Structure formats: C-alpha cells, structure tokens
C-alpha cells in the first residue's frame, strides 16, 4: 500500500482534512488554547478548516475577539473572523457581524466577515443579509465577496440578487466572476 | 504496453541534445550558499493587453499563445500517451526538465478518495522515467527513499519533472552529473495511468468500482507535447532570478499600480525583503517587471482569488495570463481564499513548469492584504509584524514550491520532503504525547512551536518552506534554507547562472 499516499497526493488537491477527537480535547489550559488559536492564524496555503476551529470550542471565542481587535496585521484578523464564524454561537456571531459593518476595519477583515456570514446564517437568509452589501458597499472587493458568497451558498435567489446588483451598477461592477458562475449553473443545473 | 520509440522522436531528441556540452562538475553539489552581494534589481513596467476570455470558457489545454522563452530555443513534439521516448544524455549534465503539455486529454478523472468518488484533475506526468542501466528515476509507486524525482499535487494539462529536486538526484549531480547514456520515458497522465498502472487501478481504474465505469478508450487517447531541456555545468553558488509581478490594484485608497511600484515604499520594502529571503539560497533578484492586470481582470478578481472557483475568475484563468519569458510570474491579488477561509498564497504546481507561458500553471499567487500595514517594519526582516515582509515571505515560499521545493514536513507530520538535510517534524515524535494517537489519521497539526527544537528532529519551523507562518509575539527570525534547498533552487532553469559557469543549454525534441 506504499503507493496510496503518493497516488492521493498526485491526484487530488488537499482537502480541508478531518479533525479527529484528539484535537477536540486538545486544549488543556488557557495558554495552550491561546497558542493554538495563534497557530491557527498562520497556515500559508491550506487553512485549518472549520472543523478544527469548532473543535477549539467556545473558550476560544474571547481569544479570537481579542485577535480581531488587537492583531496588527489584517491577514490575522481575517483569519480570526473565520475562526469565530466556524465556532459560532451568539457571541461569535455578534463579533462577526460587527466586523462586517465596522468601517474602521481593513477591507480584507470585513470581506472575511462577509464570508463568515455564510457559515452563521441559513442559506435562505443570505440574499436578504447580503443584498445591502451588493448594493451599497463602496469597496468593490466587498461587493465581489458578497456576490461570491451568494453564488456559492445562496442558491437561485442568491444569483438573482447578484444579477440585480450587476444590472444596477453596470459595467465593472466587480461581479463578473459571480455572474459567470451563475450563468454556468443555469446552463448545467 | 511499451511501444517502440518512434524513430523521428529519437532522432529529434538526439539531435537536440547533441549540442549539450560536457563540463566537469565540481562537487559537492549542495553547499551552504553565502548570501550574495546583489546589485539593486532593475525595475521596469510592461503593458498587458490580454483580452477577456470568451464567456463560458474554461481554461484547460495550453492555448496557442503558450510559449517558451525565445532564448531557450525549445521545440516540442506531440506524442500519444503510452509512447516510450528515448534520448541520449551526454556526460556533465547537471539538470533536466521534462515537460508534458496536453494537446488532447480528458480534463478530469473520477477517482476514489477516502471511499468517496470525486473528480480529480487529469495530472500530466510520465508513467516512468528511467536512467541508463534501467534504474527507475520516477515511477508512481516509488517511495521517498527510492525516487530520484519529486512531484506532488494536481498538475492538470501541463506537468514538469524538475531534476534535481531530491537528495538522490543532487548526489548524482555531485558525483559527476546525471547518468550519461540512454534515458527513456513513457508519455502519460493520470487518466492513462488509471488505465494501465496496477497501483492506480483500485483508485481510478476498472477495480475502483466507479459509477459510471471509467472511459478507458478516452483515457488511452491522450496526446502530449513533450520537451526535455538539459543544463550542463556545475550548479553555481549564486544565481539570479527575474520576476514579473502582475498587479491587482487591491486597495481603493492607495492602489497598487505598475507605474508607481518602483517608488511605492511598501512595494519596495516587500521587494527588499524578498531579496533577503532569496539571498539565503544564493539568489539575487535580477530584473523586476511590474505589470497591471487589465481592467477586466481587475474586475474579475476584485474579491481575490478563490481556489474553489472554476472557469471564469478561477486561479487557472489568472495564471493563464502569465506571459512569456525566463522569469517567474507572481500574481499579487487582494486575497487568496480556499472556499470561505483566507490563505496567504499558493503555487500553480509542485513544482511548476519553468518558462512556459499562458497555461493554467504559469505562475504563483500571493495575497496583498498585509502589504499596506507597515507600522511593524524595522531594520530587520520581520514577517510576524511587518506587512510587506509577510507578502515577501509568501512570495518567497511559493517561489520555492514553483522552483522545486516542498514543505520539509507536511502539516500532519507524516510526509516529508525528498531532501536529507532539511529538518523534520515527525508527528509521532514531536506532537505532545497525549496527541500522538491522532498522528496516524493525520488530524493533529504540527505547528511552529512543536517543530522548533535545535538540530534536525522536531525542527523546521524557522525554515522558509515550513507550512505555516509563525504568528506568535516574539517569534524568532524565520526564512532559513538548507544547502540542498538552495541548490535545488539554483539548479532550476529559471535561475540565471553567472557567465563563467553557464554553458550551452539544449532543448528537445
């Protein structure tokens, strides 16, 4: 079976991986948990994935909130938002939504928060939640990310919201990729 | 299974290789590189007028515009999968790049992964590469200790073997060069492998229980252009790499623009720090070309690059903009995301195809999200606090992958790079004892603090190619490279060698 690893590595992109029970019981104390939270902000290519964030449990939420406010680099704040969105719960949800609205946060952090909304809200609610971003956000990047989230998680209504925003904004709406994905979906349902 | 080599192919290969010079190699091949004294990189701008792809297009096959650097004089000939090619290698060859470019191939292959049927990209790779005397240098089921060539990950449509990028191959080069004599290779890809290679059968062949069954006729109909490029002469201690940066504006208030880049302090800090990282491999940054992505591309990747996106807006489409020339194409984009989570960067292939333009693998990508956060920047390169240094380290790391390097230890601590002098961080030895039960299933992640022992065991966290940035406060200096890593980088054909060491390069068929 020595070929199994090689075969899989050649054929497939790495997936999100699975977090086993061992990671669930990993955090014995605050310091270890804090170290793990910090470490989870650092993967260069493949992120740790939502399961591992969830396995850290609710005790990680205040640490991620702190990272969201105090980390100097936007990339780490953005990853902290992703962790909050994956862990979920009322406190995490409030922090994510607050980050999405916070104009003092770098655009990349707000964009990560918009992606986080997709984890926190039921898919049926996404069009209503993200339509204002599509229509009103000044930063093209926020509109583009909202559209990407709607296309991937918001179903037909998500595509309808993206098309409507694109039509209202006209050329260079920042929604081209999302519109193309909707077109492909329509061609091959 | 093996067909006789086509006479024309053999002649073409022989003719092309006949001009390669035999130059005595000085060993050892892997020496610690002294940080070179580099001239200041030259910087210029270039315009990219690439039209937007037609709606509905989904890049896969290399387009007609795909080109090798003119000065490399590469000619490639097309062969069906299953063709065995042979060529004669003269003494004194220190590097060889074998590239397969799909002319006609299925884009994806149904594949059983962890008991689930998925669609795997149809990676391009030879079924075998065999040295004179019959020693296999590449076979799909060789172990790390047996294989002279390393490649990983999907490489749909275009794939290269980059030699040397293992300790075995480096040792061979140090011992007088790649074995001289008749080399052979069978043209192939994953689909063809699924049809004929027994170890692949339970994953994607008739023994995989696929629904519908695999279309073996289509798998056997693939066609690839093949080129073999060799390099002669000793791998020098120093080299120069040229870079083309493709810029997304990324920021609304201080957009990145090619015309401004040479005077943009954040961009210049990034470039200086990138030079510092590469200097540890004996590399200088030579010519830097700044290129604005066209307006349609600015719009298309306004939200960054999401690796889960296909067709329009995909990374494949972005990398297809990578233009011709003996340089590495670096795409700086507002964000890199894997689904709903952010990453710092990624390479189009492990290793990339050096020099071939406009394919879905013609470059690397890095996120600019930290570029404008320079408050933590000081005199030292400091990627745990200085935003431009984060971008620099990301680019250096992805450049390392593109030119032939892997993570010394993959994140689950179960898979290691093919170099003997890189530190390892084996999960079974380095994870906390109470976590080691998770090592077998690969669910424990070997983060930086677990891999920072002195020596070469439970180490590697400070290596440039470690899989995670060290984000802790007070993190130690990172970005180290071992002598063998440096040699792999300098051996790549995209690295220019100082004139005295350089000699005739040749390409075939």
Image (cartoon, coloured by chain):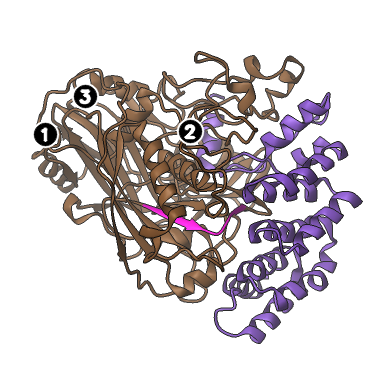
List the residue tagged with mark 2: B465
Q: How far apart, in angstroms, are the residues tagged by discs 2 and 1?
A: 30 Å
- Name the N-terminal-most of marks 2 and 3: 3
Q: Residue B471: x, y in percent?
A: 62, 36
- Name the N-terminal-most of marks 2 and 1: 2
Circle number at residue B179: 3
Specify whether residue B104 is painted magenta.
no
Which element carries disc 2, helix, strand or loop? loop
Front residue (pair B200, B159): B159
Packing grade of label 2 (10 A; few <14, some 14-19, many >=20) is many
| Number of the front mark, 2 or 3 | 2
Front residue (pair B251, B76): B251
Q: In this view, does B213 lie to the left or right of B403?
A: right
List the residue tagged with mark 1: B500
Q: In this view, does B493 lie to the left or right of B73?
A: right
Q: Against B426, is B354 above or below?
A: below
Which element carries disc 3, helix, strand or loop? loop
Q: Residue shown at 59%/22% (left/top)?
A: B451
């Amino acid at each position: 079976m020595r070929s199994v690893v090689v075969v899989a590595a050649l054929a497939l992109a790495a997936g999100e991986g699975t977090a086993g029970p061992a990671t669930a019981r990993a955090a014995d104390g605050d310091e270890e948990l804090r170290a793990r939270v910090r470490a989870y902000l650092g993967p260069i290519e493949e992120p740790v994935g939502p399961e591992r964030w969830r396995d850290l449990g609710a005790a990680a939420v205040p640490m991620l909130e702190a990272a969201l406010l105090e980390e100097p680099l936007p990339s780490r704040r953005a990853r902290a938002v992703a962790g909050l969105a994956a862990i979920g719960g009322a406190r995490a949800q409030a922090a994510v939504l607050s980050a999405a609205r916070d104009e003092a946060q770098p655009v990349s952090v707000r964009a990560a928060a918009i992606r986080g909304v997709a984890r926190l809200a039921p898919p049926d609610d996404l069009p209503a939640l993200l339509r204002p971003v599509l229509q009103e956000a000044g930063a093209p990047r926020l509109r583009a990310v909202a559209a990407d989230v709607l296309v991937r998680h918001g179903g037909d209504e998500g595509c309808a919201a993206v098309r409507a925003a694109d039509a209202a904004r006209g050329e260079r709406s920042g929604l081209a990729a999302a519109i193309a994905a909707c077109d492909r979906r329509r061609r091959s349902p | 299974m093996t067909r006789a080599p086509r006479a024309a192919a053999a002649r073409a290969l022989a003719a092309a290789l006949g001009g390669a010079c035999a130059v005595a190699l000085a060993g050892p091949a892997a020496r610690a590189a002294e940080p070179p004294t580099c001239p200041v990189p030259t910087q210029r701008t270039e315009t990219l007028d690439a039209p937007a792809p037609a709606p509905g297009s989904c890049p896969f096959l290399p387009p007609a515009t795909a080109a090798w650097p003119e000065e490399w004089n590469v000619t490639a000939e097309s062969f069906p999968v299953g063709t065995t090619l042979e060529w004669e290698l003269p003494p004194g060859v220190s590097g060889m790049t074998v590239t397969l470019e799909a002319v006609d191939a299925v884009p994806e292959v149904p594949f059983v992964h962890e008991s689930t049927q998925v669609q795997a990209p149809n990676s391009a790779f030879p079924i075998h590469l065999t040295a004179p005397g019959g020693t296999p240098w590449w076979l799909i089921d060789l172990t790390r200790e047996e294989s002279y060539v390393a490649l990983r990950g999907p490489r749909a449509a275009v794939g290269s073997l980059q030699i040397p990028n293992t300790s075995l191959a480096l040792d061979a080069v140090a011992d007088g060069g790649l074995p001289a004599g008749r080399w052979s290779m069978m043209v192939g890809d994953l689909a063809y492998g699924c049809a004929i290679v027994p170890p692949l059968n339970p994953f994607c062949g008739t023994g995989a229980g696929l629904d519908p069954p695999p279309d073996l006729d289509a798998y056997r109909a693939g066609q690839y252009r093949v080129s073999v490029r060799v390099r002669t002469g000793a791998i020098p201690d120093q080299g120069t790499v040229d870079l083309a940066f493709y810029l997304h504006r990324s920021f609304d208030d201080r957009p990145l623009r090619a015309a401004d880049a040479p005077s943009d302090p954040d961009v210049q800090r990034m470039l200086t720090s990138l030079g510092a990282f590469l200097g540890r491999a004996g590399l200088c940054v030579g010519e830097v070309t700044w290129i604005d992505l066209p307006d349609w591309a600015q719009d298309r990747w306004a939200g960054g690059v999401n690796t889960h996106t296909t067709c329009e807006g995909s990374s494949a489409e972005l990398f297809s903009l990578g233009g011709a020339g003996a340089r590495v194409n670096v795409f700086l984009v507002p964000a890199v995301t894997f689904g709903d989570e952010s990453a710092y960067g990624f390479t189009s292939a492990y290793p990339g195809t050096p020099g071939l333009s406009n394919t879905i693998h013609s470059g690397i990508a890095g996120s600019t999200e930290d570029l404008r956060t320079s408050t933590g920047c000081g005199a030292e390169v400091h990627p745990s606090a200085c935003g431009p240094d984060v971008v620099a380290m990301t680019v250096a790391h992805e450049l390392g992958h593109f030119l032939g390097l892997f993570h010394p230890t993959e994140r689950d601590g179960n898979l290691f790079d093919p170099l003997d002098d890189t530190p390892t961080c084996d999960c079974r030895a380095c994870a906390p004892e109470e976590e080691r039960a998770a090592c077998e299933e690969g669910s424990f992640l070997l983060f930086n603090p677990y891999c920072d022992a002195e020596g070469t065991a439970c180490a590697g966290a400070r290596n440039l190619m470690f899989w995670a940035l060290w984000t802790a406060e007070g993190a130690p200096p990172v970005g180290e490279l071992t002598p063998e890593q440096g040699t792999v980088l300098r051996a790549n054909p995209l690295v220019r060698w100082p004139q005295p060491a350089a000699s005739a390069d040749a390409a075939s068929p």
